[in-house]
Image (cartoon, grey):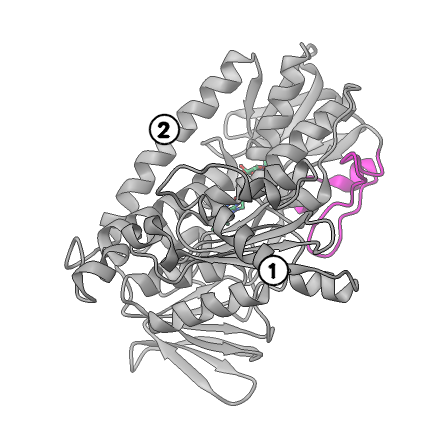
Amino acid sequence: MPMTVISNNSYDLVVIGSGPAGQKAAICAAKMRKKVAVIERKRTIGGVCVNTGTIPSKTFREAVLYLSGLRQRTFYGRGYAVKDQIAMQDLVFRSDAVMAREIEVIKSQLRRNRVTVLEGNARFIGDHTVEVASDFGSTVVHGEYFVIACGTRPAHDEQIPIDGKRIFDSDQVHDLQELPRELIVVGAGIIGLEYASMFAALGVKVTLLDQRPIMLDFADREIVESLCFQLRQLGTVFRLGEKVVAVGFDEARDRVFAKLESGKKVQGQALLYAVGRRANSDQLNLEAIGLHPDERGKLKVDEQFQTSVPYVYAAGDVIGFPALASTSMEQGRLASCHIFGVAATIPPNLIPYGVYTIPEISMVGATEEQLTREKIPYEVGIARYAELAKGQMLGDDQGFLKLIFDPSTLKLLGVHIIGDRAAEIVHIGQAVLAMGGTIEYFRDTVFNYPTLAEAFKVAALDGLNKL
Ligand SMILES: Cc1cc2nc3c(=O)[nH]c(=O)nc-3n(C[C@H](O)[C@H](O)[C@H](O)COP(=O)(O)OP(=O)(O)OC[C@H]3O[C@@H](n4cnc5c(N)ncnc54)[C@H](O)[C@@H]3O)c2cc1C
């Protein structure tokens, strides 16, 4: 491969990766009039978020909800569907359109802010210096500062024969040629659960396996129990606390199987392997600058997203939990702010979590379990969607919103929601939490009617009635 060294290839900030963390780090620095380059090894920009993760999966979910007619079944009966025979092509068609538009939006934002996009694989070759290699040759780029936002890829295991057809990972869901009749999902983390619920809503018989006995351990237990109940209603079978020891394909029977440590054998037409993700830092030659990731490739950073090498910052999935597009964007922005001397922080207890299962879950603030552990007294107010006019109109009679508050000061401590639009309305609670407000705000505020937002008022009244 020819090597071209361009002497003026020097930037104030070099960002590795064009996902949410990289984009926001770059744009934030560019707005401070810095000379910025983003290096992306893929042909398309946007990272996992736009190309294989958030955007395709959430658009897929919208297509599932629409075509399956799931929300309408409360009114028109269990057999109702907008389309009788739903094919994978029907589901991914919508994702392709949304992804193409998102890519255009990102390209235009980077262009408007005069961020240079360099295509190629970046690897450190010395202090402040990376080599960017593509099919067209190599370039050496010099950066005063770096933000590593190289993201992750699905973690694979040599024992799991992933072929992208019958045994596939979350990056390959959209390439499936046909919708399986039965699906085994290995891994009940957020990604595994989201896809399990989408396939279950399509009428696929789903079996969910995880060696951990508890799912979504950061979420409110009552909410998780409700999720399990609703997924069982869709025919999902849970095998939790069960370790998968082998996965294979039985050619004679044309079946995929997963053997469990307990001796059970689960069979199906296809298997989704969704057991964690591995950071892409292994391809960056970080030894050249004395940086050492952990065994999953994650980089350690301080509160300002600075690594142990002072001119190198890291943001997004490469630094680990919570590994969300929402938090990655903010981390990228904050890293740039710190690099160029602008004060900014994320209040840690105000990060919202959205889990786009069917039904949707969202939360912000403390859980009952956390407060109990910390011996902090609390009271709870609940609003059930079945009691809200809007909940009934939407056909969601299972959803609920829970407010957790301090019984003596009435200060809001946490908000937990399962049901339609949970991830949207949680932000009302987040705003009150950020202001240090009390649940009296919800009692004394007029909400549009009928809305799901009204659940905040109903839950506040329920909580106050308990005192
Ligand atoms: C199925 C799925 C569903 C998800 N759903 C949600 C959701 O609903 N909400 C949410 O908030 N989050 C969701 N996420 C998580 C979200 O996608 C990630 O948190 C987010 O994309 C991380 O952003 P990032 O910038 O850290 O990295 P990424 O988006 O992974 O981007 C990293 C980029 O760096 C590039 N790169 C890597 N190494 C190099 C190199 N050496 N040289 C040049 N380029 C390099 C990669 O090609 C990639 O484009 C989901 C993830 C998955 C997998």
Q: Quadrant of residue 272?
A: bottom left
Viewer-nearest of discs 2 and 1: 1
Q: Position of residue 330 (x, y in %)?
A: 64, 33
Q: Residue furthest left?
A: 84
300 lies above or below 163: above
The one nearer the camera, 386 or 56, is 386
Magenta stretch: includes residue 283: yes
270 or 331, nearer to the observer: 331
> Residue at point 34% right, 62% down?
199
Check the picture and name the quadrant holding the N terminus. top right
Residues rendered magenta in the picture: 281-309
Q: Look at the picture and state if 263 lies above or below 279.
A: below
Q: Is residue 226 left or right of residue 242?
A: left
Q: Is mark 1 within 8 Å of ligand 1?
A: no
Q: Label 2 crowding class (10 Å Cα cut-off): few <14, some 14-19, many 20+? A: few
Q: Position of residue 317 (x, y in %)?
A: 63, 44
Image mark for residue 380: 1
Query: Can you say which quadrant of the picture contains the C terminus?
Result: bottom right
Mark sitting on residue 101: 2
Q: SS of the residue at dot 2?
A: helix
Residue placed most toward the observer, 27 or 233: 233
Q: Residue at x 60, y 33 (%)?
A: 329
Quadrant field for ligand 1: top right
Local packing at callout 1 (Cα closer than 10 Å; few below 14, some 14-19, many 20+) is many
Tell me what residue is drawn at x 81 percent, y 27 percent.
311
- Residue 165 visible? The answer is no
Identified by mark 2, the residue type is Arg
